[in-house]
Image (spheres, coloured by chain):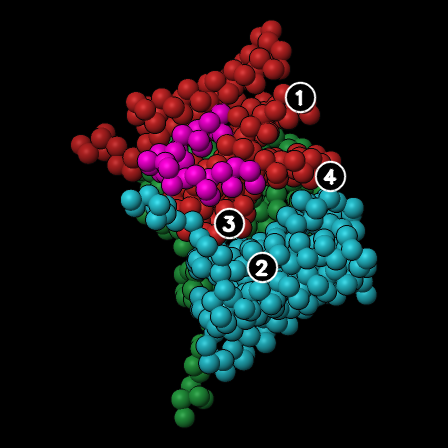
Chain colours: A red, B cyan, C green
């Protein structure tokens, strides 16, 4: 199994868990769980493959991904009531999925020989689009855009780390590992310790006289 | 005309009716009707064709589909005020469109030789995405995800029925007919008699001591 | 630089300004600005290129578009607080971007030899989808569908004007210029003087006895 295939499997499973948990908040039935779980799980990678014009979308080439997403949906459907706090579980699973989806996007773009701007965009898009579709369709406030947390910034830093490692002596698998680590640490640190970037302020102090 | 082309025409027309009816609830002008009607009408098939990497999107290959969607939009713009209950009309037209869009997705996936998981996903996606885009863009609660009704489940059962008929001795047109019938009967039964699957309950009785 | 490439650059820059302004209303951080600005800037053209099955998406073929969108995002992040009225700025920049994105869509469809229905649809979709994604993701009421204003109608009229000029003796660049002018004048007139088309009325006077 290639590094990208492994990352795709892992992010499909974990994003599917978050999709099914959001479906549980929306009180959907089993097929609703499967649909939202699949949408979340394969959304980012599908957009990546379409935009990069890969010959076949990853989950069409290998339908086992759908099986993986369905297994995650079933797991949540039958066991989610044991979770103390579903909103918190969604946040943490989503952080894990982000940390594998970003290198999955970065890895494909690197394989195809794209330059840094496309590599970074693909990392961010592959990481962000599944969760964005999940939240827009289920009418939740998009986690991707939650104020005062690192999310897209964590994805950006992870993709940048991958590029830096590659520009040094690093082989691609190491670069993808570094990307996953940086993304997860920043996202987890943000959720745990409140790390954040300054947000836009419409009236900064220097204008208040 | 092939079976899939016929199903595409019919689902384009009927989904366009639902799109235009939603546009009428949003008080849009004529071009707003045409846009939402077209988006709803070709949305599911466009996603299907993109994901399956068909050479040309169906309505680009044959722009008469746009004419069909426009005719439906005009019809609604000038005659919808005669309807007693537009919300109810949307639900029933949507049920009819779903029952033709699901086999349209199933038929394309079967033609391309895909396995059961992809066939079922394509049936559900082709059936669900047009209505999902319509409702997300017009800020309606997505019909696809309405609680306590069979929708995605009806699409799933229809796609599964098509596979079963094909695995027996059935030719593809019969499988698609069976798919349409099963999808429509389940959806219509759900709207009329309240048929539904159990939804996820966060605290099932066995936990209440 | 071809006429379409020039239009793409300009619409990317101006749509990115609107995306970043919407990001400022949502109080996002710098990476949030970059993401929403890029989504808005390349959304319409990406859908156009996917649906028309162009060999490479325009901003993958030439990543400088991402640089242009990022520059616009930075500009807004650091200087938007100087604007008196961001909502009004969004409307006017969006009008300008629409007026270049519609001919960018029309031009590509004409180049590929498509018929009038596809040309008009591509104009409307390229013009409308970026702003639609921006507003749906950031949970704003979609500008594209705002009641009692010309928006899709302006795009439609612009695309129609391009076709008329081409059917006369006009060369393509003149047709695209005419398209931009008609789109902008109608949109600007609508914002300034309240020009609009009649909207759908569920109970027209003749039914009130």
Residue C116: x and y in percent read 71, 61
Is disc 2 in the same subunit as disc 4? no
CB atoms of marks 2 and 4 within 8 Å? no
Is disc 2 in the same subunit as disc 1? no
Mark 1 or mark 3: whose residue is earlier in sequence? 1
In the image, which is nearer the foreground, mark 2 or mark 4?
A: 2
Distance between the Cα atoms at labels 2 and 4? 37 Å
Question: Nearest the camera: B61 or A35?
Answer: A35
User: Circle 2: is it few (<14), some (14-19), or many (20+) Cα within 10 Å?
Assistant: many
Res. A2 mark: 1
Is disc 1 in the same subunit as disc 4? no
Numbered range of the magenta stretch = A70-99
Location of mark 4 (residue): C55
CB atoms of marks 3 and 4 within 8 Å? no
Residue B160: x and y in percent read 66, 54
Distance between the Cα atoms at labels 2 and 3? 12 Å
- Quarter holding the N terminus of chain B is bottom right
- Residue A98 lies in the magenta stretch: yes
């Amino acid at each position: 199994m290639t590094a990208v295939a492994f990352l795709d499997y892992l992010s499909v499973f974990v994003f599917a868990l978050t999709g099914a948990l959001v479906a549980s908040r929306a009180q959907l039935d089993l097929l609703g769980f499967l649909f939202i779980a699949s949408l979340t799980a394969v959304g980012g990678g599908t957009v990546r493959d379409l935009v990069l014009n890969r010959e076949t979308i990853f989950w069409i080439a290998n339908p086992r991904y759908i099986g993986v997403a369905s297994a995650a949906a079933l797991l949540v459907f039958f066991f989610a009531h044991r979770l103390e706090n579903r909103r918190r579980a969604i946040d943490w699973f989503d952080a894990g999925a982000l940390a594998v989806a970003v290198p999955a996007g970065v890895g494909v773009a690197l394989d195809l020989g794209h330059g840094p701007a496309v590599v970074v965009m693909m990392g961010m898009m592959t990481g962000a689009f599944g969760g964005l579709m999940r939240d827009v369709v289920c009418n939740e406030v998009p986690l991707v855009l939650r104020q005062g947390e690192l999310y897209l910034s964590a994805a950006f830093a992870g993709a940048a780390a991958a590029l830096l490692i590659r520009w040094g002596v690093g082989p691609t698998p190491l670069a993808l590992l570094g990307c996953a680590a940086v993304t997860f640490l920043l996202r987890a640190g943000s959720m745990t310790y409140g790390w954040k970037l300054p947000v836009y302020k419409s009236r900064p102090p220097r204008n208040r006289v």
